[in-house]
Amino acid sequence: MTGLRPPGLLRALALGMCLLAGAAGAQTPAPPVTTPDLQLAPQPGTAKQPGGEAMGAADAGPDYAAWEALASRAEAATADRTSTDSALDRMRAQLADWREALLVAQSANSTRIATLRTQIAALGPAPAEGETEADELATRRTELTDQLVRLQAPGIAADEAYRRADGLISEIDRIVRERQADELLRLWPMPINPANWPAAMRALTDTGVRLWAETRTAVARPAARQQLADNLPLILALLVFAMVLIWRGRHWMEHLTWRLQEHASARGAKIWALLVSLGQIVIPSVGVMALTHALQLTGLLGAVGSVVVEVFPAIGFMFFAARWLGGRIFPKGSTKDSALTLTPERRAEGRFHVASFGVLLGLDMLRAAAMDPVRVGDAAQAVLSLPILVVGGLQLLRIGQLLLLHVRNGAAAGGTPGYRDRLIVILGRVTIAVGVVGPVLAAVGYVSAGQAMVYPAAMSLGLAGMLYILQTLVGDVYALATRNEEAGREALIPVLVGFVLTLATAPLFALIWGARLADMTELWTRFREGFQLGETRVSPTDFLFFAMLFAFGYGLTRLFQGALKTTILPKTSLDQGGQNAIVAGVGYVGIFLAGLVAINSAGIDLSGLAIVAGALSVGIGFGLQNIVSNFVSGIILLIERPVSEGDWIEVGGVQGVVKAISVRSTRIQTFDRTDVIVPNTDLIAGQVTNWTHFNLSGRLIVPIGVAYGSDTRKVERILREIAEAQPLAVLNPPPLIAFMGFGADAMNFEIRVILRDVNFSLSVRTEINHAIATRFAKEGVDMPFAQRDLWIRNPDAIREALSKPAPAARPESAPAALAVTPQIPQRDQVAHESRAPLEDLPPDDDADSDTEDSR
């Protein structure tokens, strides 16, 4: 590669810094600037003593005389239609300072006022009409009331002044917004009208002539020529330095960035590539700054030339930032790191459009700086603005089409459009609409409206691109920290950080689309002021203090719960259910106390919420009665403990082990390892079977059937021996062998045995059945099986049908209608026919074989 390598670039930057430092020392000092005397309003919170010394707000409070003068001037300015926007903004800034000071003054003597109110309340209620009280109490009540009135007076005055300042600020904001709306809807001279084109040509010609005249006048001055000669070596060095950085600096950084991206698999290479790529903005911008400084050192710039040269750094930064942003969104390399799914040709087109828009914004800035709006006129401004808007609209149109093309390429590749793709579709369509509507509005004369659409749309796209780059950077940093590049970017923390970044850019989007900085500061002021809750104003600071105290109390509660559960309660005689109930109750009480202490410490007065609480109680009684019922049932469960964690219960057809009891529901794990959530009301109001609440012992019943003809005493002895041989069987009372009766197929017995732990009933039943099968086989006791006797209701009809000879085979040519199939009578066809067992049928060999075949 030809040109300087990065080490040479570092040396060039060091040389440039030295040149700029020398330029600052060699520059001719500017003459002192004199400013007219401005009558500044007295600062809020200060007053003048008779001697003229300022007295602080802590001593005398706000100077209401100065405030009255400022408020009167502000009222006059809002009533005067000729007041400029800049004058209104300055007035608004002073009013905002006063409003903040008055807000602080509202809480003056608040501590003493609260003490006086408690003192008055301690005297008891004031006597009703016609009643009297003791002279000492009446005198003391009067004194305290007079003190309270005097102490409340500064706060009341500050509140009145605060409301006046707030109203004036709102009035100024309304006037400025109405003027902005009028400007957007103002109809300029139509730029597509050829009659307005000569005005634009004259404006361009006049600007060029003025620049030439200023330069020629400066050259004619001996002082200017002497300054040029003195600074010529430094100027030449700065020009060379600037040209090197502007021409080659970006290329060096781009090559270094590309080499780092090629090794993106190395840990942290993407992060370093992004940081190094910022040099594509910084280094050429430093070159533009050096060029600007060199031109200023010549001393040949006039009024217009100085204004034009001063905007060079901003124009250069805008252009190089646009090129860098286009390179990051539409990269040259592989598509794996590309934000959009596009072909290399389309990505190259995207880079061109983004960089071109940076040029357009720079040209519009240069036009606005070089041409005085009052001097050139509206017609010239409209005509000169239209070409820039038209080209910008076409570029927005094409960028919107590229965004839609990305979504179509993703769908063609078999991907499912997600939330991000849907946002891109909306963004692309809005961009296309702005690219068409903006230039059309400007062409018909609404130039301000066109500019308010095209330029903010382009800057919004750039800010969205920056937001994507920052979110990608956060994901890469998190992946580097967790050493998991695949799952690191999709983790929760990068997503939350990206969401916070998106919220943080909301004010920037608002400023881009025409919101005033004063509007943003007003929103922040309203946020800091907080809201009224009862008789207390709650600010974000109070809320933060409340959250910190509550979090501290909650942490202490959890620590105390842990100590109870692991250290204290295991050493007591309480069962596990009781321990869990105590731990849960301590948690509820601790959370309640933490919230109560945090509310009182933050100074939040909840007395004003009594009416709201009463209204909510009615709603709770009707709409939330089930939830409240479950909550109360949960408290009862924790106190009475009819059901505890670890119990084997059966409720509502659900049988399992209790795993957790909360204030609303109870979680039961069935023996199929499935969790069933049961409302606590069902456990309190319904029928619950608790197998293991007070003790683990329980009865097991095992039914057995033996064949008829078996020795019943022998069977009873075998079953008793099997039952008594079980290790978990309780021998007092001994197992009971019950002869239950005679069944259809067997004689029925039951083993009834008490187990020490009913939780093992299934395994004990299995062992008993195995033992029964083994002993019965050994002792010769037969197991019964189901027996059924088959009776035929119409044996005569069946016998007659079977005795008939089989029909002769019909020829193949015979029609199907001649085929005759003998019909076998149905079993339940004749209800009154005689019934006979199957053994009564005649012993006909043919019939037997046919019967077997039919079976």
Image: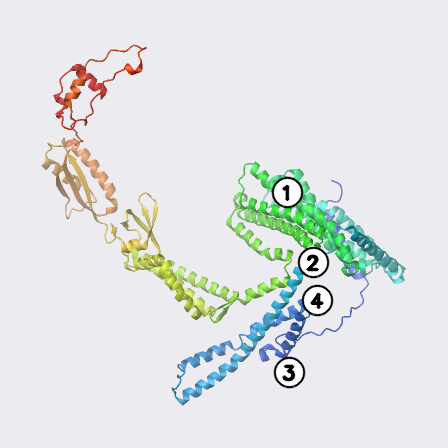
* In the image, residue 718 above or below residue 511: above
Image coordinates for residue 490, horizontal then vertical, percent: 52, 46
**Dot 1: element:** helix
Residue 84 circle label: 4
Callout 1: few (<14), some (14-19), or many (20+) C-alpha neighbours within 10 Å?
some
* Disc 1 to disc 3, C-alpha distance: 70 Å
Image coordinates for residue 540, horizontal then vertical, percent: 52, 65
Up-down relation of residue 413 to residue 299 (above or below): above
Which amino acid lies under the numbered mark 2 shown in the image of this protein? Arg
In-front residue for pair 794/150 = 794
Amino acid bearing label 1: Gln
Specify which label sits upstream in the sequence, 3 or 4: 3
User: What secondary structure is marked by label 3?
Assistant: loop
Q: Earlier in the sequence, mark 4 or mark 1?
A: 4
Going 41% across and 68% down the picture, which residue do you hit?
611
**Callout 3 environment at 10 Å: few (<14), some (14 to 19), or many (20+)?**
few
Q: How far apart are marks 3 and 4 (CA)?
A: 35 Å
Q: Is residue 780 left or right of residue 762?
A: left
Residue 829 versus residue 41 in the image, above or below: above
| Residue 154 location, quadrant | bottom right
Circle 1 is placed at which residue position?
A: 401
According to the picture, the residue beneath numbered tag 2 turns out to be: 186
Q: In this view, does 327 lie to the left or right of 730?
A: right
Quarter-wise, where is residue 348 in the image? top right
Question: Which labelled disc corresponds to residue 49?
Answer: 3
Which residue type carries mark 4? Answer: Thr
